[in-house]
Amino acid sequence: MDARVRYTHDAGVSSIDIDDGKVNVMSPQMQAELTTAFDRAERDDGVVVVRGRPGALSAGFDLNLLGEASGESAGMVVGGFELALRILSYPRPVVIARTGHAVAMGAFLLLSGDYRIATTAPARLTANEVAIGLTMPRAAITILRQRLTPAAFERATLLAEVFGPQSAVGAGFLDEVVEPDRFDERIAEVASALTRLDRDAQCATKRRTRAPLIAALTAAIEDDREEFAARVASAAVN
C-alpha cells in the first residue's frame, strides 16, 4: 500500500506531509503513519510542521466505515482521538498548515497543533457531526472546548457551523491567515522562529500548561471507548 505520509527533517524542523491522493481521510492506516511520523520527529527533536495536500488538510474519518457498528469503526474513531492526544502531548512546538478543507476529525487534527496557519482561500472548516446524524464524541468536545471562544464552541458543536478563514481566526480555530502566495514563506518563518526557543523551558512549560487538557482528553477517550464497545456489543446481539 502506498504511503500516505511523508517525513523529512532539516535544520531542526520535522516536516510531515499528508497526501492520500484524495481528501486525506483519517483511516486507521493514515493514523498509524502519522503516529510513526511523530515518533520519528520526537527522536529527531524537531519542531514539527504538518501540512495536507492542496485543497485538503483532512475531510475526517472514512464515512463508509464510520456508519458501521463494528469494532473496526470504533477503533478508527478512538484511534483518531488518540492521535490528537499524541500531537497535543508532543514536547516541541507543532505547526499545522491548513491547506484546504478541515472537516470533523480534520478540524480536531488542526486544533491539536500549537500554531495553525491557513490561506485566505475559501475552504470548509467545520465539526459537522450533528449535521450528519452523529452525537459529538466526548473527546471531540474536549478538544473544541480548549481552543474555541465560548460562543464559537456552542456554534461549532451544536450548530455545525462552517467557518471561513477570517471567522476561524476569531473563533480560535486558526492563529493566522495569509495570502496564498505567502503561505510557504510564512510557514517557514514561523517554524524557524520556533526552533530558536529555549528547548528545555519550552518543553517543560508545554507539559505544565497542557497537563489539565491531557488528563481531561485521556478520560474522555476512555469514556468514548466504553460507549463504542457497548454499542458494538448491542449491535452484535441484535
Image (tube, rainbow, N blue to C red):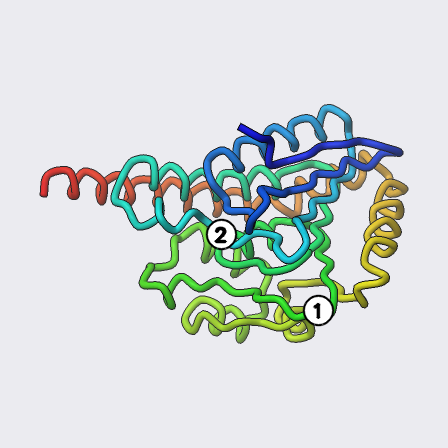
Task: Look at 59% across and 60% down and name the residue there.
Answer: 101
Task: Say which quarter of the image contains residue 174.
Answer: bottom right
Left or right of residue 193: residue 213: left
Quick one: which residue is furthest to the left in this view?
Answer: 238
Image height of 154 relative to 4, above or below: below
Expressed as whole percent of the image width and height from the top left, the position of residue 19 reads: 63, 43
Crowdedness of circle 1 by 10 Å Cα count: few (<14), some, many (20+)? some
Q: Are marks 2 and 1 in contact (CB under 8 Å)?
A: no
Q: Which residue is mark 2?
A: 60
Question: What is the three-letter code of the residue carrying label 1?
Answer: Ala
Left or right of residue 114: residue 104: left
Q: Between residues 209 and 111, which one lies in front from this camera angle?
A: 111
Expressed as whole percent of the image width and height from the top left, the position of residue 142 reads: 48, 54
Question: What is the three-letter code of the residue carrying label 2?
Answer: Gly
Looking at marks 2 and 1 on the same chain, the residue that comes earlier in the sequence is marked by 2
Task: Look at 70% across and 56% down and name the residue there.
Answer: 116
Q: Quadrant of the C terminus?
A: top left
Task: Look at 88% across and 48% down and name the residue there.
Answer: 193
